[in-house]
Image (cartoon, rainbow, N blue to C red):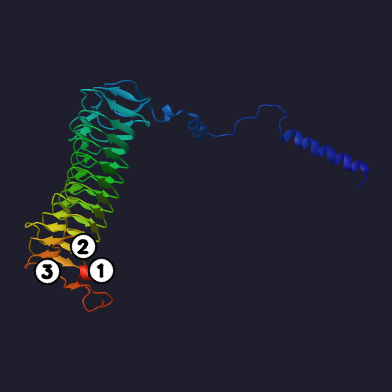
Amino acid sequence: MNRSCVIRMCMAFSVVGATALPAFGAEMEPPPGPPGSDEAAMRSLNEIEPRVPIMDLPHVITNSGAYYLLRPLQGTTGITIETDDVVLDLGGFSLQGLTNSGNGLSIVSSVQGVIIRNGAIDGWNGYGISGADAGHVQVLNVSLILNSLGGMRLGDYCTVQECTATENGGHGIELGESCTVKDCKTSANGGCGIVVGFGSQVIGSSAMRNTEQGIRAEIYSTIRDCSVVHNTGHGIQVNASCRVESNNIGDNGKDEGSAGILVPGPGNRIKDNNITANYYGIDVAEEGVGNWIEGNNVIDNNVGIRVLGTGNFIIRNGVGTPLETNSPVHFAIGETNQYGEILENMGGAFTNSNPWANIRLTEEQSGE
């Protein structure tokens, strides 16, 4: 290629580059099309979710919307919610009650759709959260401490998750019908740790050192994967047609003659629980009819499994009692119940001939 051709090609490339790219430092035009997504990304949090700060106590919420704390607040009257559809973010701060205070947070009768999250409510002379007739309330990641009447009391269809209720004067968590308590911790409350109504569920939670029952549930409820330890009263008390499965229950009612699991009513399913060092391991009252008790490990209780009711089914349980007990009672089952054969100190003699058998471990098995 001769020199003149090279020069002409370079001049052509220069012309194309000059028309395709702006001069250095020139302002570029924005891309075509509506800027909706870009505009949304530039908005402030308050524009996306308008929120109202709560600066002082007392405070009454009369309009639906989102509210938040900017700092810890103290007072004798807390926050009162008088309308539906309110989100209250405590922002990691606390509502602290002073002398002669009332409730930390009150939700008036029939209010629905409240969300309370992320903070603490402590030291109130009433309840931490009071709303016995409020429904569809969610309480998430809230600590309730040293409130005189109780941690929280709410109505039906509520969800309480990842909350703590400690050293409150009454029940730690008290809810109505069709409620859920999940991943919560209750301890050292003056009443029960957790109380739920008809058709509720308590999952993955703990109840320790409460003055009354650890967990108490009404008809058609489920209690699963919970730790229930050192409560003065019964560990778990269910009414009727409940499921109590895969819980760890220990050292409840040892000095009060209480049970790890008390079954006062009919139609419950008590399965795969680990029940140790209570006075009674499982205690079925005279009104307890048609309960299914299966696969529980019932060890070191003064009395293993006592069934005073009729028409119950007791199979595949392993029962042993503490060696220091003078008169150990492994099974006390009324004659009108159905139960698998009770085999004693089987050692290595297990076979498939009786898969429904209950197993009893006595002192002789341990060489005493």
Q: Identify the mark at residue 247; answer none if there is no mark.
A: none
Residue at the image position 70 percent from the left and 27 percent from the top:
25
What residue lies at 86% left-to-right and 39% top-to-bottom? 8
Q: Is residue 249 above or below residue 335?
A: above
Residue sitting nearer the eye, 14 or 54: 54
Residue occupied by mark 2: 323
**Mark 3 → mark 1, Cα distance in angstroms:** 29 Å
Q: In this rendering, does residue 312 appear at all?
A: no
Asked if the residue under mark 2 is in contact with the one under mark 1, i.e. CB atoms within 8 Å, the reply is yes
Disc assigned to residue 338: 3
Relative vertical location of residue 266 with respect to residue 180 in this rendering, above or below: below
**Disc 3 marks which amino acid?**
Gln
Disc 1 residue crowd, few under 14, some 14–19, many 20+, Cα 10 Å: few
Q: Nearer the viewer, residue 297 or 195?
A: 297
Mark 3 vs 1, N-terminal side: 3
Secondary structure of the residue carrying numbered label 1:
helix
Q: Locate residue 325, reporting x and y percent.
A: 17, 60
Q: Is residue 292 left or right of residue 93?
A: left
Instruction: From this view, report whether residue 195 is shown above or below residue 261.
Output: above
38 in relation to 305, above or below: above
Q: Is residue 289 left or right of residue 63?
A: left
- Residue highlighted by disc 1: 366
In this view of the protein, can residue 349 be seen by the observer?
A: yes
Mark 2 or mark 3, earlier in chain:
2
Outermost residue on the right side: it is 2
Determine the secondary structure under disc 3.
strand
Q: Quadrant of residue 52?
A: top left
> Label 1 sits on what residue type?
Ser
Point out residue 17 in the picture as x, y percentages from the top left corner.
76, 36
CA gap between label 2 and label 3 equals 28 Å
Locate residue 110: give its quadrant. top left
Tell me which amino acid carries mark 2. Leu
